[in-house]
Amino acid sequence: MIARRTLLSLALALPFSGLVTPVFAAGRLNPNTASANQLASTPGLTPQLIDAIHRGRPFATMVEFDAVVRQVLSEKEAEALYELLFIPVNLNTASRAEIGLIPGMSSRMVREFLEYRPYTGIDEFNREIGKYVSDDEVARLRSYVTL
């Protein structure tokens, strides 16, 4: 199995020619804006799934994207893919299901994310979620969210 760091390095190195960068925090691609070449170079994506992503864009939420992915991939395979390809989750508006799609999320952490709404800024997220997990884990979780 390829190490997470290697996969993220691969994602950072993927070519992109466009006006809007599809890469956000931690080198993760946004499936709504990733180029055909980037999707084709993403481990875990089959030609069938790449075609389904192109046909389904833009996805309003990760839940909508997950419905397409799960037609082809298992839960474990989807979670591995979401380390490389993910639509940022809005902390103040995301559903419980959407937050739960962040790789490694437990039901307890989903509750904590929801409990502190509305977030007034990312510093508040860091402080409140930092009560439950390490600084490294806060940084990892932060890479999946937006305000």
Image (cartoon, rainbow, N blue to C red):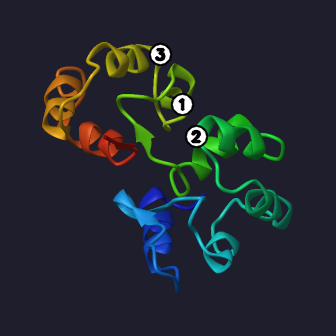
- State left or right for residue 47 relative to residue 65: right
Disc 2, SS = loop
What's the residue at 56%, 62% (across, down)?
Answer: 2
What's the residue at 69%, 59% (across, down)?
Answer: 44
Disc 1, SS = helix
Asked where in the image residue 92 lies, by quadrant, the reply is top left
Location of mark 1 (residue)? 98
Asked where in the image residue 64 lies, by quadrant, the reply is top right
Which of label 1 and label 2 is nearer to you? 2
Q: Amino acid at mark 1?
A: Glu
Q: Amino acid at mark 3?
A: Ser
Mark 3, residues whose alpha carbon is within 10 Å: few (<14), some, or many (≥20)?
A: few
Looking at the image, is mark 3 or mark 1 earlier in the sequence? 1
Mark 1, residues whose alpha carbon is within 10 Å: few (<14), some, or many (≥20)?
A: many
Whole-Å distance between the Cαs marked 3 and 1? 12 Å
For the residues bearing labels 3 and 2, Cβ distance under 8 angstroms:
no
The answer to which of 136 and 95 lies nearer the viewer is: 95
**Where's residue 131, x and y in %?**
17, 21
- State left or right for residue 132 relative to residue 5: left
Quadrant including the C terminus: top left
What's the residue at 15%, 30% (across, down)?
Answer: 124
**Where's residue 100, x and y in %?**
52, 27
Whole-Å distance between the Cαs marked 1 and 2? 7 Å
**Where's residue 61, x and y in %?**
58, 40
Location of mark 2 (residue)? 61
Location of mark 3 (residue)? 107
Looking at the image, is mark 1 or mark 2 earlier in the sequence? 2
